[in-house]
Image: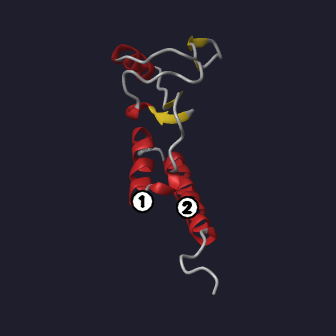
Amino acid sequence: MKRVPLDEAEPGMVLAKPVTNQTGVTVLPAGTELDQELLKRLDRMNLTAVYVEGAASAAEAKSPADLEQDLNQRFRKVAGDPTQVMIREAVRRHVQTAQQAVHAEAPSAGGAA
């Protein structure tokens, strides 16, 4: 299962988790195959992401520039809200710190002599 931002979801993907509305009522059950009309409907619900079947992608495979672009894309609809800008900046710092930690823990290429 992997989480896919709604603007990256494509027809043919299959929901791994049900989609619920703000009151918790299931709108689309797990196992539903997405099509263009359903994607439009989810966008009208202001949904930001869905869980679809498939293996999760490795975040560390993305470059820092790609991660920054993804973050900007996710916050694009609230760019004028000062609180959301602060949240985006906090998330950006967290991602940078997490990336630095992953790279620091990676084994060195030289190995022991």
**Sequence-earlier tag: 1 or 2:** 1
Residue farthest front in this picture: 113
Rendered view: 11 above or below 85: above
Residue 43 position in % (x across, y down)? 42, 23
Residue 32 position in % (x across, y down)? 50, 14
Judging depth in this view, the residue of 113 and 10 nearest the camera is: 113
> What is the number of the mark on residue 63?
1
State which quadrant residue 77 falls in.
top left
State which quadrant residue 13 falls in.
top left
Residue 102 position in % (x across, y down)? 59, 64
Horizontal relation, residue 111 to residue 70: left or right: right
State which quadrant residue 9 falls in.
top left
> What is the number of the mark on residue 93?
2
User: What residue lies at 57% left-to-right and 32% top-to-bottom?
Assistant: 1
**Amino acid on which the number 2 mark rests in the picture:** Arg
Mark 2 Cα-neighbour bin, 10 Å: few <14, some 14–19, many ≥20:
few
Judging depth in this view, the residue of 94 and 88 nearest the camera is: 94
Horizontal relation, residue 10 to residue 102: left or right: left
Horizontal relation, residue 82 to residue 113: left or right: left
SS class, disc 2 = helix
Residue 113 position in % (x across, y down)? 63, 87
Mark 1 Cα-neighbour bin, 10 Å: few <14, some 14–19, many ≥20:
few
Judging depth in this view, the residue of 85 and 54 nearest the camera is: 54
SS class, disc 1 = loop
User: What residue lies at 64% left-to-right and 16% top-to-bottom?
Assistant: 23
